[in-house]
Image (cartoon, helix red, strand yellow):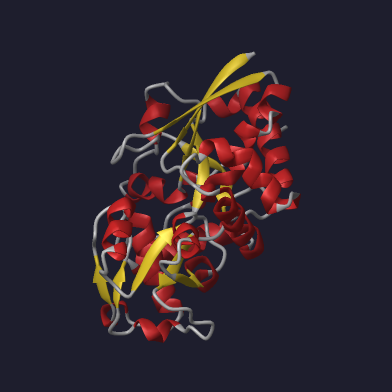
Amino acid sequence: MQPIHIQFTRFSAFYSPLIATIATGFLQDEGLAPEHSIAAPGVSAIDALVDGSAHVVQSAPSQAFRFVAAGETPPAVHFAQINELDGFFLLGRAADPEFTWDKLAGARVLVDHGGQPLHMFKYACLKRDLAFDAIVAVDAGPPDAMIAAFLAGEGDYIHLQGPAPQQLAHDGAGHIVASVGAAIGPCAFSSLAATREWLTTDMAAAFTRAYRRARQWLIETPAAEVAALERPFFPDVDEAVLATTVADYQRLGNWSPHLEITPAAFAVTVDVFRHAGVITADIAYDKAIVPPPAA
């Protein structure tokens, strides 16, 4: 078996296509022995590609924007999608089956202020005809601190990636009222990245075959079976909560069948970052995105 090292920037059930690639045994079928790690807080997993400690990483196409905007060549390229929708949810203190985004006006919302999550949330507000400034957007720190603040009584709503909101709902601390991904629609949200050199190797082709199999398996397999397989990766998450999270993402269509990061999805993400004021010019698709290695 040839070792292959995979690094995550964030680790959650949202990234189940890559987790399933490790958990199903499909990599072993290709002669690859997976090892995985999580980047330290505040550190980009792209750094692990640059220093050679990882072969492939979970990232986001927007990671390349600052390089392309500056006329520089990004150190890595993005070759396959993980999620084609934003994976954050809004959880409120009360059930609201008739929720509309205008109800956030004047409300205190604990918003994830990480770069892309914040920019996507602002864009979702735009798409739902809500001025972001109409919200009292609370920066309570990283997700764990946000959850602690919400449980302590801060805020009317909280903005989190699964399975955190599903866990809060399971514990009776709130109710999921909206999906940010559903508000925005398809976009190039999260991706697999590697160096151009690695993508020409037999290992890259073997990895891609396994990833394609795992992605299709994830789409077709009942959420409870997926949760049972992934449970060892989430020892602190109730298996029923994990199953609910997987089912939510399956239903929303986060994990569409194709691997390619499409120009249309990429264009939406460029528009998100332009709306946030992070970039002003267009970003050339082929400077950041390449096709998956030929299987």
Q: Quadrant of residue 104?
A: bottom left
The x and y percentages for residue 255 are 63, 53
Q: Residue furthest right?
A: 220
Question: Viewer-proximal residue, 223 or 17?
Answer: 223
- Residue 277 is left or right of residue 187, and the answer is left
Q: Please tell me which residue is depicted at 39% across the width and 28% down the height of the picture.
A: 48
The x and y percentages for residue 53 are 42, 21
Q: Residue furthest top?
A: 1
Residue 113 visible from this viewpoint? no
45 in relation to 126, above or below: above
Q: Please tell me which residue is depicted at 45% across the width and 81% down the height of the picture.
A: 128
Q: Quadrant of residue 213?
A: top right
Q: Please tell me which residue is depicted at 48% across the width and 83% down the height of the picture.
A: 99
Rendered-image quadrant of the N terminus: top right
Question: Viewer-proximal residue, 238 or 156?
Answer: 238
Residue 73 visible from this viewpoint? yes
Q: Please tell me which residue is depicted at 61% across the width and 27% down the height of the picture.
A: 204
Q: How many marks?
A: 0
Question: Viewer-proximal residue, 142 or 211?
Answer: 142
Q: Quadrant of residue 91?
A: bottom left
199 in relation to 69, above or below: above
- Residue 97 is left or right of residue 213, and the answer is left
Rendered-image quadrant of the C terminus: top right
The x and y percentages for residue 282 are 41, 60
289 in relation to 95, above or below: above
Question: Viewer-proximal residue, 39 or 70?
Answer: 39
The x and y percentages for residue 93 are 39, 74
Q: Residue furthest front?
A: 172
